[in-house]
Image: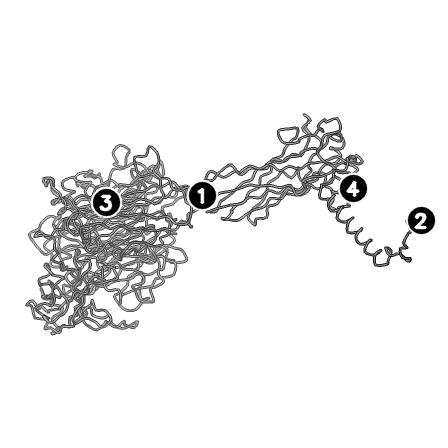
């Protein structure tokens, strides 16, 4: 977290910008530090580990310890101690402690048989599943060893007490003494007293030679810690001394001391934490004693710390102070966990991570959970604990469900910087992971300096599981002056020892003028003929303290590499090197051969060329890396000697990698701060602001597939560098493109964001452009869209109140639907014999066909979803009784021609009498014409109407069309028969009967469809006429004209024939008549 002094008063915009610049720089550094572990490696070597395999299914590796047998100052023998609590001995699973030598052999571990009673069958004792090896601890070089079996049982005819037992061993791994702190204590109330102690669940040998035994079982699993001396001292002896007395032991005048086993004069008193209700600091089921540690946490005398992972729901750590004048410990303090069920206190270890020579405490909470983090480790510094500042800590977190913090160990000072480092196991992350966190003057560092995964190990270990379940460190087992780390993987019955490689300490730096690079210049002092801007840098390094272990080295080959920009994860780079690699112009690599004794600073020079002048507001980051060029150690075959890591040193990784920056000279005034003033405006085309809306809330009717956003950006002041408009939008919108008069704006989409580059720099002026989205993928049920438009710049925007526009739009879809209808048989007849239902067998005996057809058409422009057509169908006469006479009898289920449509109708109304289908027999028609006319007296003929609101019972038919695209139709067919008997009985004297069904469109309001409703309802009419005699209708005048013309033609034809036959000729001529006679 970045913290600024409270007395800093920001009273103008320029100071605000400087503050923001500081924050931006800090955020960039954090970004770069987040990728640091990718290239920073520590000195624990994973290529040639020492690894051992134990008996199958023995839980070999459940606990581990490093130990050194010190026969003399020059005779040291390093061994690995491994607990295997499920090992079989004499046909039962008693558990075992194994000793493994530092060899390349993988199955040379031997069972130490620490139990002085070699028989597994002892009267009043049950060693079956006692879990010997559940806890293994070593005091270190020349110190004592302890091993425990927390399920060790004392039994009798009517009792079984789970006391637990621990054994101490001399430095030579010979049996010394057994410890049963709960034996002989009150057991009348069984588990409510000391009946199930489970002593040895955890343990430690303190610096003042006290054995500490964690026992989570006493008093209903309230738990406690027991303490006892592990040795006594006799003065004035000539024997070789054991490990140096700690500062907590009484000082003696004679340096010669001798170690003896316990005798009758030794202090055999068991000291313990209080367990009685009211005196114990924890409640029942707290499991106090699940972990234990010791150290001068409060800066004075030795303090005992014990974890109670279920106490208070969150877990607690109890600090005890031992007073030899009384049996029970005094309470010194309590640490509280911060999350329920996180098991705070499940594991712990002491270390000096800040180099103040006092013990700090690391506490594991492996079941901690927060978002994507799982497991936590809390580190408390002694300086805070001594001032009772128990709420101050550093928290490290792991990955989800990894049980990060399940195992903790003091790894020692791995890199020789005078700060002890912390090893943390996460056994359920992948196949298991171990993290190394470095100490520093300010405490533990927040990021791991090394991450060790199973995939980093040689192939024989790639399949192991629960790697990191147990840890032990802080001992130099291969005598190269660097501590090594032992790791257990009990599910695979495997242990792995990672040895540390020696470190060559160096100091690195970068020189050169990298703060005022002119992007518009040509050439530079080291290349004046260059046609582009260039500048030079000088990477320098210097050897510091030289290790005596590396005295055999006379020369060293040193590789160095400089990479510009791409190491941060970005794909482009703005500069190239003169001596760059062929395929990567932004990277330069060289090898230097130097004398190992050369202690003066050594520098080289590299010329760098500016590739393009864009993005000059931001500095150019470079990464400088140094590494040793040396042979890789060969993996030994089983039985070979281990490689000497003194022959394979590595550089100090904190100095071997360095990040530096090159900054540009910008035309933004003498202070190099660009004060721009950007004004952003954005509005959706065709969107209407909602009434009484003070925010950017709109309504938009979609009438095509395009949504257009109008954007206007104005700069009223100095140039704005790295100016972008960022458009965040609803996921259902798809970016199509942008429209602008020139190419100044370049937009690129990525998922739910469009990023538009506005030019670099964006000078004083105004730019208008459009961004077009496609709405085709908007789900039918989506009713709102959001669009957030903001402008970003690396320059100082003196007024940023108008740099953000948020648009929330309610969307409606325009789809003009029309419902029409037609009766296929507009008129039908009824009459003849009346037949009852029982007398009929076939459909055609019911009456004539009546088919109503409803047509739904979508005139667009958009599709309509889930269109429902509700049809009221007249099926019976409304006589006031439950069942009436049939009107239109539905003979089959209504259908929809559209593939995604169907009708819903109660099956009781579909051919309930189960009439059979048959081809229609054409009913004999009488030669009667019907018409709607007045009779001779001028009276109107009587008609009837049957509809849902006039004399008929109706049934509701619901037809659903799931999707109607624009300019498509769907047809609904309802097949039925006119019930002839009903009409003959009730309507024979009527001129005709009008039968009506009505349909209407109903849209689901969830889909926000807007349309005209005037054409959403239609009524279909069928007229039924009785069989009766009617006068023929008068013919139209043109029939008479046609008849006249036909008669004239026939007459003309006859005349023509007569003429041709001479009918009109006379045989005798005309005689002249005498008129004078």
Query: Mark 4 and mark 1: span between their CA atoms?
Result: 51 Å
Q: Are marks 1 and 3 in contact (CB under 8 Å)?
A: no
Q: Nearer the viewer, mark 2 or mark 3?
A: 2
Instruction: Indicate the position of residue 529 as horizontal and vertical percent values.
Output: 11, 72
- On the image, numbered disc 3 is attached to which residue? 803
Q: Nearer the viewer, mark 4 or mark 2?
A: 2
Q: Can residue 131 be seen here?
A: yes
Instruction: Indicate the position of residue 468 as horizontal and vertical percent values.
Output: 30, 56
| Horizontal side, residue 797 vs residue 177: left or right | left
- On the image, numbered disc 4 is attached to which residue? 925
Q: In front here: 220 or 975?
A: 975
**Relative vertical location of residue 802 with respect to residue 525 in this rendering, above or below:** above
Please tell me which of labels 4 and 2 falls first in the chain: 4
Query: Mark 2 and mark 1: span between their CA atoms?
Result: 110 Å
Please tell me which of labels 2 and 3 falls first in the chain: 3
- On the image, numbered disc 1 is attached to which residue? 814
Instruction: Indicate the position of residue 878 as horizontal and vertical percent values.
Output: 67, 28
Label 1's element? strand
Label 2's element? loop
Q: In front here: 175 or 587?
A: 587
Q: Nearer the viewer, mark 2 or mark 1?
A: 2
Please tell me which of labels 2 and 1 falls first in the chain: 1
| Horizontal side, residue 802 vs residue 889: left or right | left
- On the image, numbered disc 2 is attached to which residue? 1077
Q: Which mark is residue 577?
A: none
Q: Nearer the viewer, mark 4 or mark 1?
A: 4
Please tell me which of labels 4 and 1 falls first in the chain: 1
Label 4's element? loop
Query: Mark 4 and mark 3: span between their CA atoms?
Result: 84 Å
Query: Mark 1 and mark 3: span between their CA atoms?
Result: 33 Å
């Amino acid at each position: 977290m970045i913290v600024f002094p409270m007395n800093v008063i920001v009273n103008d915009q320029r100071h605000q910008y400087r503050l923001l610049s500081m924050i931006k720089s800090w955020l960039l550094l954090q970004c770069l530090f987040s990728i640091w572990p990718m290239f920073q490696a520590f000195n624990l070597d994973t290529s040639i580990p020492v690894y051992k395999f134990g008996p199958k299914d023995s839980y070999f590796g459940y606990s581990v310890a490093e130990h050194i047998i010190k026969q003399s100052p020059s005779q040291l023998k390093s061994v690995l101690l491994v607990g295997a609590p499920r090992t079989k001995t004499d046909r039962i699973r008693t558990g075992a402690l194994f000793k493994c030598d530092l060899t390349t052999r993988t199955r040379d571990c031997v069972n130490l048989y620490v139990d002085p009673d070699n028989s597994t069958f002892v009267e009043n004792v049950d060693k079956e599943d006692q879990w010997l090896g559940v806890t293994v601890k070593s005091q270190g070089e020349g110190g004592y060893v302890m091993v425990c079996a927390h399920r060790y049982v004392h039994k009798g005819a009517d009792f079984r007490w789970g006391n637990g037992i621990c054994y101490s061993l001399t430095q030579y791994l010979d049996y010394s003494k057994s410890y049963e702190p709960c034996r002989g204590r009150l057991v009348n109330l069984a588990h409510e007293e000391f009946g199930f102690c489970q002593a040895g669940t955890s343990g430690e040998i303190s610096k003042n030679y006290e054995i500490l035994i964690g026992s989570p079982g006493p008093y209903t699993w309230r738990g406690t810690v027991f303490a006892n001396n592990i040795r006594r001292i006799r003065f004035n002896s000539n024997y070789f001394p054991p490990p140096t007395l700690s500062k907590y032991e009484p000082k003696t005048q004679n340096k010669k001391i001798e170690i003896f086993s316990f005798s009758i004069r030794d202090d055999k008193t068991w000291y313990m934490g209080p367990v009685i209700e009211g005196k114990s600091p924890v409640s029942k089921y707290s499991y106090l004693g699940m972990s234990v540690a010791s150290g001068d946490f409060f800066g004075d005398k030795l303090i005992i710390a014990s974890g109670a992972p279920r106490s208070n729901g969150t877990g607690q750590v109890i600090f005890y102070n031992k007073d030899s004048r009384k049996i029970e410990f005094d309470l010194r303090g309590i640490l509280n966990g911060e999350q329920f069920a996180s098991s705070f206190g499940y594991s712990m270890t002491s270390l000096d991570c800040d180099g103040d020579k006092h013990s700090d405490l690391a506490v594991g909470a492996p079941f901690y959970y927060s978002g994507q983090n799982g497991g936590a480790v809390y580190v408390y510094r002694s300086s805070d604990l001594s001032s009772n500042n128990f709420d101050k800590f550093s928290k490290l977190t792991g990955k989800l469900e990894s049980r990060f913090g399940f195992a903790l160990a003091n790894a020692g000072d791995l890199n020789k910087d005078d700060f002890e480092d912390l090893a943390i196991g996460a056994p359920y992350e992948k196949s298991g992971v171990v993290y190394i966190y470095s100490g520093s003057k300010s405490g533990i560092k927040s990021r791991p300096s090394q991450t060790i995964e199973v995939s980093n190990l040689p192939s024989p270990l790639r399949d192991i599981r629960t790697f990191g379940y147990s840890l032990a460190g802080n001992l130099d087992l291969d005598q190269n002056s660097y501590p090594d780390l032992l790791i257990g993987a009990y599910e695979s019955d495997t242990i792995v020892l990672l040895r540390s490689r020696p470190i060559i300490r160096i100091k690195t730096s970068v020189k050169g003028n990298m703060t005022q690079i002119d992007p518009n210049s040509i050439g530079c002092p080291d290349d004046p003929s260059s046609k582009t801007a260039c500048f030079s840098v000088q990477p320098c390094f210097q050897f510091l303290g030289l290790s005596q272990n590396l005295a055999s080295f006379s020369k060293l080959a040193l590789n160095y590499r400089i990479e510009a920009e791409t190491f941060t994860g970005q794909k482009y780079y703005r500069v190239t090197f003169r001596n760059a690699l062929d395929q990567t112009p932004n990277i330069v690599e060289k090898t230097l051969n130097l004398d190992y004794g050369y202690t003066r600073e050594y520098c080289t020079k590299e010329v760098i060329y500016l590739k393009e002048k864009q993005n000059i507001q931001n500095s150019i980051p470079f990464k400088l890396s140094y590494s040793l060029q040396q042979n890789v150690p060969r993996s030994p075959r089983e039985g070979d000697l281990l490689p000497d890591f003194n022959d394979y040193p590595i550089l100090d990784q904190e100095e071997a990698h360095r990040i530096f920056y090159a900054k540009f000279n910008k035309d933004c005034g003498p202070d190099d701060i660009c004060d721009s003033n950007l004004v952003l405006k954005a509005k959706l085309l065709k969107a209407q602001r909602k009434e009484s809306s003070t925010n950017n809330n709109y309504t938009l009717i979609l009438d095509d597939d395009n949504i257009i956003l109008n954007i206007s950006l104005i700069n009223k002041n100095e140039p704005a560098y790295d100016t972008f408009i960022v458009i965040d939008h609803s996921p259902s919108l798809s970016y199509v493109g942008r429209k602008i008069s020139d190419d100044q704006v370049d937009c690129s989409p990525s998922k739910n964001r469009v990023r538009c580059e506005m030019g670099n720099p964006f000078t004083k002026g105004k730019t208008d452009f459009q961004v077009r989205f496609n709405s085709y993928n908007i789900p039918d049920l989506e009713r709102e869209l959001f669009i957030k438009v903001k402008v970003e710049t690396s320059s100082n925007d003196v007024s940023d109140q108008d740099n953000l526009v948020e648009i929330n739009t309610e969307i409606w879809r325009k789809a003009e639907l029309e419902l029409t209808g037609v009766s296929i048989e507009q008129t039908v007849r009824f009459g003849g014999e009346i037949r009852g239902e029982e007398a009929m067998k076939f459909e055609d005996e019911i009456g004539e066909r009546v088919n109503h057809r409803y047509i739904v058409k979508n005139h667009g422009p958009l599709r309509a979803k889930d269109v429902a057509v509700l049809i009221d169908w007249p099926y019976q006469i409304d006589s006031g009784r439950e069942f009436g006479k049939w009107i239109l009898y539905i003979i089959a289920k209504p259908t929809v021609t559209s593939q995604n449509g169907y009708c819903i109708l109660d099956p009781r109304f579909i051919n309930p009498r189960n009439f059979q289908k048959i081809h229609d027999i054409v009913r004999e028609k009488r030669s009667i014409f019907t018409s709607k006319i007045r009779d001779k007296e001028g009276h109107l003929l009587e008609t009837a109407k049957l509809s849902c609101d006039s004399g008929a019972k109706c049934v509701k038919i619901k037809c659903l069309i799931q999707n109607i695209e624009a300019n498509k139709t769907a047809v609904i067919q309802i097949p039925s028969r006119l019930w002839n008997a009903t009409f003959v009985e009730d309507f024979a004297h009527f001129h005709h009967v009008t039968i009506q069904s009505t349909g209407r469109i109903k849209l689901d309001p969830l889909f926000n469809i807007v349309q005209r409703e005037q054409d959403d309802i239609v009524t279909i009419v069928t007229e039924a006429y009785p069989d009766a005699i009617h006068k023929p209708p008068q013919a139209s005048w043109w029939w008479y004209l046609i008849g006249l013309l036909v008669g004239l033609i026939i007459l003309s034809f006859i005349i023509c024939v007569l003429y041709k036959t001479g009918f009109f000729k006379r045989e005798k001529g005309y005689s002249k008549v005498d008129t004078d006679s």
